[in-house]
Amino acid sequence: MTRVLGIIAGTALILLYATLLLVVMPTIQLRTGENPPEALEPYTESEARGREHYISLGCIYCHSQQPRDPSQAPDMARGWGRPSVPSDYSYDNPHLLGTMRTGPDLFNIGARQPSVDWQLTHLYQPRAVSPGSIMPAYPFLFRETDYLGDQIEVKLPAQFQGSERYVVPRQEALDLVDYLLALDHTYPAEELPQAPEEDETGETGETGETGETVETVETGEAGEAEAEPTAAAAAAADIGERRPATAGDPSIASADAVVERETP
Amino acid sequence: MNPAIAFLLSMTFLISIGGLFLMVWGLANDQWGDGQEAAKTIFAEGEIGRAEDPATTGPRRRELQEEADGDIGKLDIDQSELADRRVYDSSSRQPVLWWLTSSVVWLLLGSLFGVIASFKLHLPDWLVGEAVLTFGRIRPAHLNVVAYGWASMAGVGVGLWLVPRLFKTELAGGRYATIGAVLWNLGMGGGTIAILAGFSSGLEWLEFPWQVDILLVLGGALAAVPLIMTILRRRVHHLYVSAWYLIGALVWFPMLFVTGNLHALFTGTEQGILNWWFAHNVLGLWMTPLGLAAAYYFIPKLTGTPIYSYTLSLIGFWALALFYSQVGVHHLIGGPVPTWLATLSIVTSVMMIIPVVAVAVNHHMTVLPRWRMVLISPTLRFVVAGAMMYTFASVQGSIEALRSVNTITHFTHYTVAHAHMGVYGFFSFILFGSMYFILPRLVRWEWPHAWAITLHFWLVFAGFGIYFWFLSFGGWLQGLAMLDATRPFMESVTLTLPYLTARSIGGTLMTLGHIVFASHFFVVLARMGPEREAAPRMMASRYVSEGGEA
């Protein structure tokens, strides 16, 4: 090639095109944040502070917040909750999707471990309540004191007790636990297929090809089942070859062997 | 079909067809240069067939030449061209030394962070007293320091050194790049402190607060100024393939980095998509083109052979631009993203096989007939190992993007191992090799200890081998355990412990190698150590031009 301007223009245009496809189009399509689910509360002040600690302590490097569909992985069976949908993240900036599971997914940790005591002990010394864990201890979120007063005492098994003094959480630990307990997305997601009888069968029928209706109904079961963890586990156990829980637009569900959730 | 998707598909189709026609037009009108002749533009008259490695010793150098094709006795190198080249090299001396020296310092710091983070994964109660030392801060500090401090700064340094040689004119505006290095370093320092102090932005690969990233944008822009100024003064008609990659990298990175830093304008899922589009492009459209630019220059240069197929390199370049820019969302397969988007990224990930094979054929077929040179030349050993790991990392990445494979490897240490195969195995190895070639020419001082280069190579090669294979295997088992709902989650944690420990051992060996390399680097910089018995060809004339000043 002999033209510098040609290379500059060509490379810039290709990247612009990629940006249009990969950044602009999904943003136009999803519009996360414009229609938050009714059941999803905005973060309270302490939860928002806790979220800042979650970010600053780098929890994201070991914990994801994006349960996968039962057709792909047994996330639901592990009690991590139904597949997440974009509107679940309506109040999330920065996003904390995470791409690592050195530890478990935390999208529904508030529903799975709603005990403040458990959370505090776990932060102070994970191995006290979760043997075998390789999560770092966070003793700097706590302090020791002789006078308990109305503070919460962090309860520890004998072998983890360093001294005779009380271990009490600092404000950071309390905020962080507030945030963790707020991670509860067990409400049903409108975007996921609902129970079969609620399906917009007319629309499904219109989209045409054989197999679609069946798919939608099947995935509908998955969508319904996840409201309760026990039902979720049961549903996941026999989920085997079920097609993914694509939601909303059935035409996309059938486009190919999809795994991700689609939004309306 | 969703109208948005219909639009996208038709756009994709039209643009692909448009690109195809553009290429046909370019071929018909000879826009692509002079075929195989163009591959020879980086050589001086009579230079082809002469092996070159400033990092090896006299007898080994003769041995190296025997492995090269040329009949050295009959060839006369055009001395005036070599003299010109020394002028080019000295024109880029100051900025290149700034960028390279900074990068070596960041390499040491980044390695330290990496090793600490690695040990922390199997020693969770080690260094937990302070927030600044917690895993969740050391790990992003490691990533940013090695990605933007080491790899990026070294890449820019190598690029700046290549610019005057590729355009056959002195580097113009070099002082802008020097100021750029200072700003970039300030940004690195500020950003690293911000992460350790808990002011991370929270997005992977974008942890530096945007206020700090402004410094990196300015520093990068200043480093691009000499590239533009030198291009305008160029004395070559045809642009050698390395130049395309350099231009591409310097066009892409500012676009990516500025867009990535606008993340606050996005929410939730869209921000995650932006995040991973950006993060993968740092590798694909920044480090990869810089690394390939260097490989396309050094492999022919060291072996004294023009690149195998010049036409193939064209396909490699444009296919890389088109496909690599769209692969990012494969990091969110299974996540709450539109199906079409993840599918698009998977398809383009697999399509990456085209540019990768093009580059692989070019690199490996150039080396293959002279493969014994790799055993002799320490510089070539690094560059060729890097080029081979590029092929490996890329093919692995294409396979890893497939949904069936990704379901196992996603969320596991396997991905971490793969990322290191790209940034370390490929890019860092090529940077090491490039520096062994460049530094003696800038400082006019040879590498005094050949054994140190060999030791460096084997420490990082063995260390990285341990790192990669153990972590990949452990990550794979971790993924299988996580997919089996009958096994408790904790099993997927505890089973990785031996592999994480092995990774720490590998990482420690790599860090030792870096210490050897950095020490040797600073010895040369200070012009210390014993002088070597036979100066390499490109520097021999220093005795002529500078009256044995050395």
Image (spheres, rainbow, N blue to C red):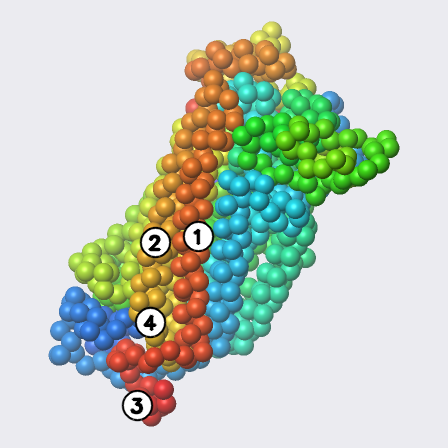
Which residue has dot 4 on it? B449
Disc 3 from disc 2: Cα separation: 39 Å
As helix, strand or loop, the secondary structure at mark 3 comes to helix
User: In the rendered image, is residue B338 in sight?
Assistant: no
Residue B153 or B487: which is nearer the viewer?
B487
As helix, strand or loop, the secondary structure at mark 1 comes to helix
Instruction: Name the amino acid type tagged 2.
Output: Phe
Q: Residues within 10 Å of mark 1 (few under 14, many from 20)?
A: many
Which residue has dot 3 on it? B544
Q: Which label lies toward us, 3 or 2?
A: 2
Residues at discs 1 and 2 in contact (Cβ within 8 Å): no
Q: Is residue B43 left or right of residue B206?
A: left
Instruction: Name the amino acid type tagged 4.
Output: His
As helix, strand or loop, the secondary structure at mark 4 comes to loop
Which residue has dot 1 on it? B508
Tell me what residue is drawn at x 33 percent, y 86 percent: B542
Residues beneath discs 4 and 2 located on the same chain: yes
